[in-house]
Image: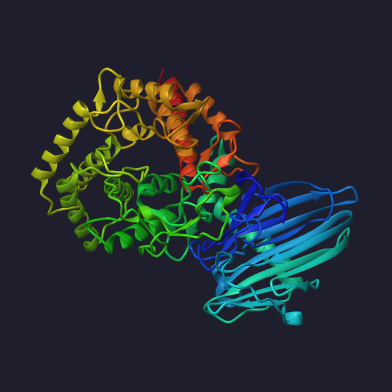
């Protein structure tokens, strides 16, 4: 295989259980089965030589363009060569619940279909599976019409196609196929983990699965209630979030990848295939505000289940079933993306103390209660336990939202979220939803937190709230003070804080770092927070929209974002695609539309 594509050269496909990254050149370079956090089958993304991949592309010189078919997660890549043109359709098939009940279908499947549309094309197909991050031997076995098989002791991988692939040793298979206009070849890669292997005729399976999947995604997309000028971008972000959702539990992973670097060649390479509590409030609000009540409730139910295992103390992250991941581990045999080592699996931030998670969980619950969700007795008991924990620990130092791996300190953002936790708990109590809490003590804690924030988090000389209590540096997370209701975005202090953040953290128009001297690029969601802050009142609607349009230009060709952006060249960095960044885009777009609607009402009233 050739050199590794850039992070932004990838698109993602998935089915609500796992996801695969497909390069512009038609190569699947990342796939973990059966779940997002399972060991990889293809990991060329992290090691082009030994990670494994599955490529389908024309031989010789070609140009490629791609898009998702309609409002779906079915990927179409069009190739043009001097002799012809064709298109490659990539997907993990999805279908209706009725079809699942009445038809026998593979547990997990990647379907790839190439059709020559004009002239003639010569295709090269390369299948190089490398199970368990390339550590396990891949003994390919040919079963004739039943395809190529790999058994790894846990499950069975099967690749079937309507053209033969020749084995190259025991670990690879290749084919060169010539297609004329109107001819098509289909490849079905499946994984059987729990049930029997299912074989269906490819000639029927391919077109039917594609049409059904496009229909299913477009039907799901049609429920989006956003109708503003940025609908295409909002809907693509929403579709990306749906791809990162684990359907059986409602969990949403931060990203489907591990160890894509914050700085190329650097060591800040983390596993993001898990679910962070810090994302809860923003995620639930975004889903609900776009009309996806079912997904919002599913995520809340996962949240309540996950936190039940360790309450009242909460962990930072969980797997898709609400369990704690295994210990962080380094995979020393993988070279890393463009030499960015180490490659890690699991995440060492698991047992950090991050007080912001308490505010996030409680705020998420309050969001849904306002929208009519009723709490069970067990959920109320959980909230009472969290109330006690917050009252007892809000003064403690912690690692904060950005999870630095050094000594804890008193982070302003963490204290703001603890204040928000107390405020939301009192709100729930006032509405009769949460009886049995110590109201007097909770009010005293809330008021003391507010006093500490006003006196020790505010730096008069700097004219801004600061990253830490009694500090002199700013942090992009301070923009969330208005989100939690501590300060209105239009207040003098918040306007001044935004101005200082832009002065110290803006590395290119529109792009913000997380904090001063942060060792990485511009952080996606921080940049969208600034847009949201402007739209909520700290600036003009025109300025908010201008910055929003700058940020939209950093999406890749199919509308996806990584965790960060390299300011010097605009390339995506970090794990990809990143849920947090897409949530930020959605929230910023919604804030812009609320501001626009408010101005229209004012004009009508005048």
Left or right of 391: which side holds 94?
Answer: right
Q: Position of residue 401 (x, y in %)?
A: 35, 43
Residue 229 visible in rendering = no
Image vertical order of residue 263 relative to residue 386, above or below: above
The residue depicted at 85 percent of the width and 64 percent of the height is 177
Image vertical order of residue 292 relative to residue 140, above or below: above
Q: Position of residue 202 (x, y in %)?
A: 74, 72
The image quarter in which residue 549 lies: top right
Image vertical order of residue 210 relative to residue 478, above or below: below
Specify the quadrant that holds the C terminus: top left
Left or right of 145: which side holds 28?
Answer: left
The residue depicted at 32 percent of the width and 44 percent of the height is 406
Left or right of 40: which side holds 368?
Answer: left
- Give the colour scheme of this rendering: rainbow
Q: From this viewpoint, which residue is outermost toward the front?
A: 332
Residue 301 visible in rendering = yes
Specify the quadrant that holds the N terminus: bottom right
Left or right of 335: which side holds 77?
Answer: right
Q: Position of residue 412 (x, y in %)?
A: 27, 35
């Amino acid at each position: 295989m050739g050199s590794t594509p850039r992070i932004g050269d990838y698109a993602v496909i998935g089915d609500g259980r796992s996801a695969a990254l497909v390069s512009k050149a038609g190569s699947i370079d990342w796939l973990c089965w059966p779940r997002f956090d399972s060991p990889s089958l293809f990991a060329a993304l992290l090691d082009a030589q030994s990670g494994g991949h599955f490529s389908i592309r024309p031989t010789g010189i070609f140009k490629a363009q791609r898009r998702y078919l309609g409002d779906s997660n079915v990927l179409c890549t069009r190739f043009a060569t001097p002799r012809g043109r064709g298109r490659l359709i990539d997907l993990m098939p999805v279908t209706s619940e009725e079809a699942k009940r009445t038809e026998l279908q593979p547990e997990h499947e990647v379907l790839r279909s190439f059709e020559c549309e004009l002239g003639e094309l010569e295709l090269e197909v390369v299948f190089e599976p490398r199970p368990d991050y390339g550590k396990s031997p891949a003994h390919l076995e040919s079963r004739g019409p039943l395809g190529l098989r790999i058994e790894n002791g846990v499950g069975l991988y099967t690749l079937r196609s309507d053209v033969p692939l020749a084995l190259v040793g025991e670990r690879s298979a290749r084919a060169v196929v010539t297609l004329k206009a109107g001819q098509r070849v289909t490849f079905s890669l499946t994984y059987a983990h729990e049930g029997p292997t299912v074989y269906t005729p490819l000639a029927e399976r391919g077109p039917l699965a594609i049409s059904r999947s496009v229909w299913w995604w477009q039907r799901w997309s049609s429920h989006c209630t956003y109708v503003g000028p940025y609908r295409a971008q909002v809907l693509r972000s929403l579709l990306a979030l749906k791809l990162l959702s684990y359907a059986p539990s409602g969990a949403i992973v931060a990203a489907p990848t591990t160890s894509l670097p914050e700085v190329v060649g650097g060591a800040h390479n983390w596993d993001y295939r898990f679910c962070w509590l810090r994302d809860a409030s923003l995620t639930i609000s975004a889903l609900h505000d776009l009309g996806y009540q079912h997904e919002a409730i599913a995520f809340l139910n996962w949240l309540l289940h996950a936190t039940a295992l360790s309450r009242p103390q909460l962990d930072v992250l969980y797997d898709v079933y609400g369990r704690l991941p295994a210990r962080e581990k380094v995979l020393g045999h993988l070279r890393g993306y463009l030499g960015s080592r180490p490659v890690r699996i699991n995440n060492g931030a698991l047992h950090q103390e991050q007080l912001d998670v308490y505010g996030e969980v409680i705020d998420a619950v309050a969001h849904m209660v306002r929208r009519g969700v009723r709490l069970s007795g067990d959920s109320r008991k959980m909230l009472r336990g969290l109330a006690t924990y917050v009252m007892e620990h809000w003064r403690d130092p912690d690692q904060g939202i950005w999870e630095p791996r050094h000594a804890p300190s008193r982070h302003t953002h963490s204290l703001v979220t603890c204040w928000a936790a107390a405020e939301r708990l009192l709100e729930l109590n006032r509405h009769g939803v949460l009886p049995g809490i110590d109201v007097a003590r909770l009010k005293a804690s809330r008021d003391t937190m507010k006093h500490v924030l006003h006196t020790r988090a505010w730096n008069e000389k700097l004219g801004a709230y600061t990253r830490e209590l009694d500090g002199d540096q700013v942090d992009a997370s301070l923009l969330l003070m208005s989100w939690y209701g501590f300060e209105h975005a239009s207040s003098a202090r918040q306007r001044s804080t935004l101005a200082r953040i832009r002065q110290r953290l803006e590395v290119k128009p529109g792009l913000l770092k997380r904090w001063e001297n942060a060792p990485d690029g511009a952080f996606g969601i921080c940049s969208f927070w600034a847009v949201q802050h402007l739209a909520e009142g700290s600036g003009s609607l025109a300025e908010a929209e201008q910055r929003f349009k700058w940020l939209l230009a950093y999406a890749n060709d199919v509308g996806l974002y990584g965790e960060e952006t390299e300011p010097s060249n605009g390339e995506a960095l970090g794990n990809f695609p990143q849920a947090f960044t897409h949530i930020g885009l959605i929230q910023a777009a919604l804030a812009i539309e609320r501001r626009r609607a408010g101005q229209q009402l004012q004009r009508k009233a005048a």
